[in-house]
Image: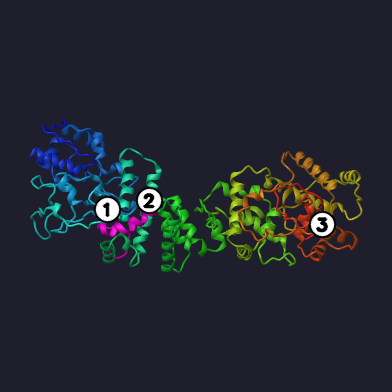
Amino acid sequence: MTAPRSLPIRVEPLPGEALDSWLRALARRSSISMRDLFIAAGPPFPTRTDHAGDYTTFLTGEEAERLAQTTGTSADLLHAMTLRCYDGLALALHDTRRVVRRVRLWGRGVGSRYCPRCLAEIGGRWPLRWRLTWSIACTRHQVLLAHACPACGRWPHRRSFFTHDVHQHECSARKPGESTICRADLTQTSVVALAPNSPVLSAQEWINGLLDRIEAGDRDSSLRDAFTDLTAIATRSLLRAEPGDFLDCGQEIEQARLRYGTSALYAPIDAAVMAGPLARAVEVARDPLGDASFTTISVLAGREIAMRRNGRLIDKFRRSIARVASPLLQQQFLRTLDSHLAAGPRLRYRTCTTRPCTPVPGDSRVTQRSRFLPQLLWLNWALLLLPPTALPSQRIDYRLWRAALAATVLFPGWWQERYDLAAESLHGRRPLRLARFLPQIAQGGTDVLTAICLLAEYLDEQAVPIDYARRRTLNGNGLLPEVTWLMICNETGTHPEDHYRLPAVRRFLYRRMTGSDLYSPSRSLNLDSSSRSQAMPVILTAPLLDALDRHAADYLTSHDISEPVTWSPPLALVDHLDLPGRELILPDIAEAAMLMRTRRMSPTAAARALGASPECLRLAFEKRHVPEGAAWFTDDNRCGIAHTDAE
């Protein structure tokens, strides 16, 4: 291959100048045409300029090296004068063609905006930034950039290269319907002046700071996130704009937007149309999680919902905003949708929290969560999340409530709309009508759903000391043999034939260890499931409970399980939330024990006689004794005086 010829005249590129502007200045200074320059550089450059590509988009390695030898400029500097330096951050280039993708990052396909005053000051040289969608204003002269020739209406620099006898500050486009070149003086173009405190100038200054970082070689992902968010917000602001939205940017900008309409698939060429939506987008992108950003996004989301009343909001979000927004901006949009969603999607997307996110298909943390979750939610948590309509004296199947609450802890991050599949990972194929429970759970308010999400996050992120999935594989075989039971009774002074029945105690101990739902177990158990043993009350003293816990620990050790017998997440996770069960007061356990011992009442009857629910009575017996009337929520998870197994 013939070596490229070196031109005798050198022209230094201006800082930030576009490649086509510099080549045009070099050709004019050397009194040669672009065809001559291409012939000097040699292949792969064509010998006909009408076959030339837009080399300002990017240069190949070979093209840059040959052009560097011809012009005496470094190849790295040549690459820096093309749009390649912004690729993947402020715009997206096509993989094989020299074009900018117009849909991704709202790219500008061809042409360049310009500031007439800057053109006059720098001798008609064109900065590379003017070719970007994000350049809409000149902060030096405080004007909007022009986008077309005032004479012919064509876009400057729409063609890649020009004839050398046209000055760089002149329009090189051909007049419509004619073969002659326009040659209009672009430095005389009228532009829209901006107020010194205009939000458009502030937005442009912030964008210029991002572009400075890119041109300095910064490839941080936050830069792409910023331009991604600008695209997402600006497109929605333009698409859902209403009269008066951009009056603070200037009357000309508001009128330009009204003339343009609301098409937002491609970035508008006119900087006046772009200015208002882009100023709003910068306000959000500067602080995506700020209150002002939330307000702006709420307005956009409200208009989106009003325009598309039919269909599922989450699906619309995934097809529009989630496709182009950064994770932080997605959080804000999800937060704004919270009040419009049912309980299931609110949990799946965690919109009720300050950190909502889109579920990731196959997320291992979500699939593993059921291992660290009992089939019946921990009792203290279940009572805390009790719906407000469930008064203590009402008849409620607390077992089903606890089972449903445990299943909902699997929803945060669940990527499928079939909630039964999430429940099956915990409860197997047992029927659990979650569609009935979810609206009732939501009646507790946003804080109840937030508490469920926080509990799920805790199980995902913290080291949980109990593997409940492994414990559910135990079938109860060998648990509390009769000989061991009699020894415990003898040690603790318990009469084995009073109110204490061995099958009922076994059921209690198995449930205590595994958190399983014994009324609908996930596997066959070697436990007495007769109605008598299920309904038998079990009253435990503190020494007896300690002895049973020691036996349970030995039983687990015999199955190679080195874990505590019982555990529950700390309630401090939700101390800041207003939960419906917060003010529940535990009944007097001494009075309850008297009713069951002397009047032979069942635990359920005793609880109702005290104006409480059976589960409140259960927790009162299970927790350490506290002064009468004291709030029952503490982080002390050690079991105390007594317990009842009857519902």
Coordinates of residue 87 in the picture (x, y in percent):
32, 44
> Residue 15: percent from the left, percent from the top?
23, 39
Q: Residue at x 78, y 54 (%)?
A: 627
Q: CA distance from mark 2 to mark 3?
A: 61 Å
SS class, disc 1: loop
Disc number lying in front (2 or 3): 3
Which disc is residue 589 wearing?
Answer: 3
Q: Is residue 463 magenta?
A: no
Q: Residue at x 41, y 53 (%)?
A: 325
Q: Of marks 1 and 2, which one's residue comes earlier in the chain?
A: 1
Q: Which amino acid lies under the numbered mark 1 shown in the image of this protein?
A: Ile
For label 1, the residue is 136
Q: Closer to the camera, 519 or 309?
A: 309
Q: CA distance from mark 1 to mark 2?
A: 17 Å
Could you say which quadrant of the image residue 630 lies in?
bottom right
Q: Amino acid at mark 3?
A: Ile
Q: Is residue 277 highlighted in magenta?
A: yes
Out of 110 and 246, give the one closest to the viewer. 246
Mark 2 highlights which residue?
228
Label 3: how many residues lie within 10 Å, few (<14), some (14-19) or many (20+)?
many
